[in-house]
Image (cartoon, grey):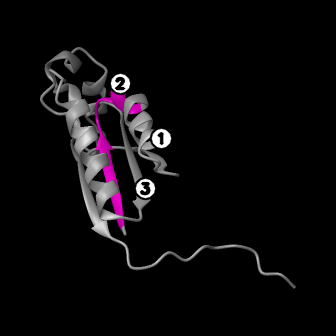
Amino acid sequence: MEVLFIVLNDLSYMGDILKVFVEEKVRGATILESEGMAKAVLKNEGLGMLLTGPFASSLPKSIGESKTLFTVIPDAQTVTRVVNAIQHLLSTSKKDTIGFMFTLPVTGIYPLKKRNK
């Protein structure tokens, strides 16, 4: 069992990635709004106006919005199929930085729910 994380900087691929999940019978994922370090540093240093001001066009496009998806996949074969399908999907992009993926092993899942009295 592994958790697959995808940090996606090019949000135009979001729908296609979710379609891969559905086709590969990945039954659930969590999608978080996320922010890269470069954008956070610019905001923290009081330079956030560079992200929208006259210098915005000179900054790398990857400093925009991003999302982080994660999903637990029970078997290694499905992980391999999903990763390969997403890599194939993103290989057509002309952008230098689309995002990145990584997996971590999952040793247990513990559902949280209300106790019955």
Q: Is residue 73 magenta?
A: no
Q: Which residue does the image show at 24% across and 26% down from the upper left?
A: 50
Q: Which residues are magenta?
A: 2-14
Q: Residue at x 19, y 18 (%)?
A: 55
Height in image: 80 above or below 12? below
Q: Position of residue 58 (x, y in %)?
A: 14, 19
Distance in Å between CA atoms under marks 1 and 2 = 17 Å
Q: Which residue is mark 2?
A: 12
Secondary structure beneath dot 2 equals helix
Q: Earlier in the sequence, mark 3 or mark 2?
A: 2
- The crowd level at tag 3 (other Cα within 10 Å; few <14, some 14-19, many 20+) is some
Return the residue at label 1.
22
The residue where tag 3 is placed is: 71
Q: Earlier in the sequence, mark 1 or mark 3?
A: 1
Residue at the far right in the pictured view = 117
Q: Characterize the local packing of mark 2: few (<14), some (14-19) or many (20 or more) Cα atoms within 10 angstroms.
A: few
Task: Indicate the position of residue 7 as horizontal and vertical percent values.
Answer: 30, 45
Tags 1 and 3 in contact by the CB under 8 Å rule?
no
Left or right: 28 as drawn, with respect to 107? right
